[in-house]
Amino acid sequence: MRTFGKWLGRLLLLCLIAIIAFVTFAPAYVEEQRNAVAAHDPYPVTPAAQALHETLIIGDWHADSLLWKRDLLERGSRGQVDIPRLIEGNVAVQVFTAVTKSPAGQNYEHNETDAMDNITLLAVGQLWPMRTWTSLYERALYQAEKLHDFQENSDGKLRIIKSETDLDALLAARAQGKDVVGGILGIEGAHPLEGKFENLQGLQDAGYRLIALQHFFDNAIGGSLHGDGNHGLTEFGRELVQAVVDRGLILDIAHSSPQVAEDVLAMTDIPIVVSHTGIRNNCPVKRNYEDDLMQRIAASGGVIGIGYWADVTCDDSPAGVAKTIKAAIDLVGEDHVSLGSDFDGSVATAFDTSELAALTQALMDIGVSEAQIRKVMGDNMIRVLRARLN
């Protein structure tokens, strides 16, 4: 019996050591693999491109940085976004999107709604509060709490934007030369509502201003681009879309099925956002909507946020992203193209947010005009934010 007790004690000790090792090292290892930046020499940026870049108002519709166990107030050695690197890249406004569910085996073609959820394991492994382990709504609230904590401890370098007044104050501070970034909270897929309409108010109270309807699977709102068929909005989905319109929130359909996009366009008259994507005629993959649908989204006054990863650009170099932006301008017009990196969204990229001057250089290299660069890099985003934020 004494031998068995010693054996059991050793086993429990080994289990404890394994758990501590997993919690300590696994989250960093996972992120290093998922959000890799390719090794590269510094991208050449001419004095003219750097000078232009420093005068731009730059905005990015999509980064999943709140998902990971990193202090965003410190310049990281992994991942693609944090406040110091945003300041280095001259980014004025960054949408921080909360991922709350991601199906195992995630792919662009088809995912089952009830597939095992990767975020549960990540929440447990990163020691998120226990309330988040079983509730998508609580995961969204927790990620909002993280951004508010970063703001509180940022010495004024991060301001959460909830209104047009907040936006104006941010831009005025930057015009005075202050190093400050505006953060906007967005939800990647409205499944954290958990079928309860009242949870929308809870998300809004927590600071969320951008609502994406779907992620990689069908939900109670409607069909995903990667779900089980091209399903449209449900009745609950229609109620949600109308509430987003009525409350002055921003509507994002980046992962929605084409039919959901059609339904949204038919029932709204607000500028619609596709926060992170590519252009089908430039990179012919399912992840990118058909060109005619993109044109009708632009006709709403909305914007197409161009991503920085190869699955949507077919070339993730600064030159490849610039080529995608040029294709978007040619397709939908210079007033309807924005940036939507998908940084820290489990995508590999060729540069991080501190290196955005290389994108400005690449746009200049292919003949995109200064006026067009200003619009794409941020002015179009600011226009839509002003149109939607109360």
Image: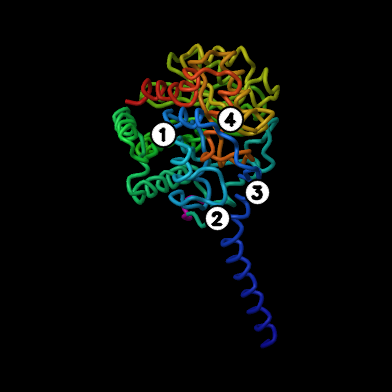
Query: Is residue 374 highlighted in magenta?
Result: no
Q: Residue at x 61, y 70 (%)?
A: 17
Could you tell me the amino acid type at mark 4?
A: Gly
Could you tell me the amino acid type at mark 3?
A: Gln
What residue does disc 2 label? 124
Secondary-structure class at tag 1: strand
Could you tell me the amino acid type at mark 1?
A: Ala
Question: Quick check: 46 above or below 81?
Answer: above
Outermost residue toward the bottom?
2
Q: Earlier in the sequence, mark 4 or mark 1?
A: 1
Q: Are marks 2 and 4 in contact (CB under 8 Å)?
A: no
Foreground: disc 1 or disc 3: 1
Q: Earlier in the sequence, mark 1 or mark 2?
A: 1
Q: Earlier in the sequence, mark 2 or mark 4?
A: 2
Instruction: State the image coordinates of residue 49 (x, y, percent, origin top left).
Output: 51, 29
Q: Is residue 166 left or right of residue 38?
A: left
What span is in magenta? 129-133
Q: 10 Å neighbourhood of mark 3: few (<14), some, or many (≥20)?
A: some
Secondary-structure class at tag 3: helix
Q: Residue at x 36, y 44 (%)?
A: 157
Q: Quadrant of the C terminus?
A: top left
Q: 10 Å neighbourhood of mark 2: few (<14), some, or many (≥20)?
A: some
User: How far apart are labels 1 and 2 at the CA level?
Assistant: 33 Å
Q: Is residue 243 left or right of residue 216?
A: left
User: How far apart are labels 3 and 2 at the CA level?
Assistant: 19 Å
What residue does disc 3 label? 33
Q: Is residue 155 left or right of residue 11?
A: left
Tell me the number on the disc at residue 92: 1
Could you tell me the amino acid type at mark 2?
A: Val
Instruction: State the image coordinates of residue 330 (x, y, percent, origin top left).
Output: 59, 13
In the depicted view, which residue is nearer to us: 267 or 278? 278
Instruction: State the image coordinates of residue 97 (x, y, percent, origin top left).
Output: 49, 37
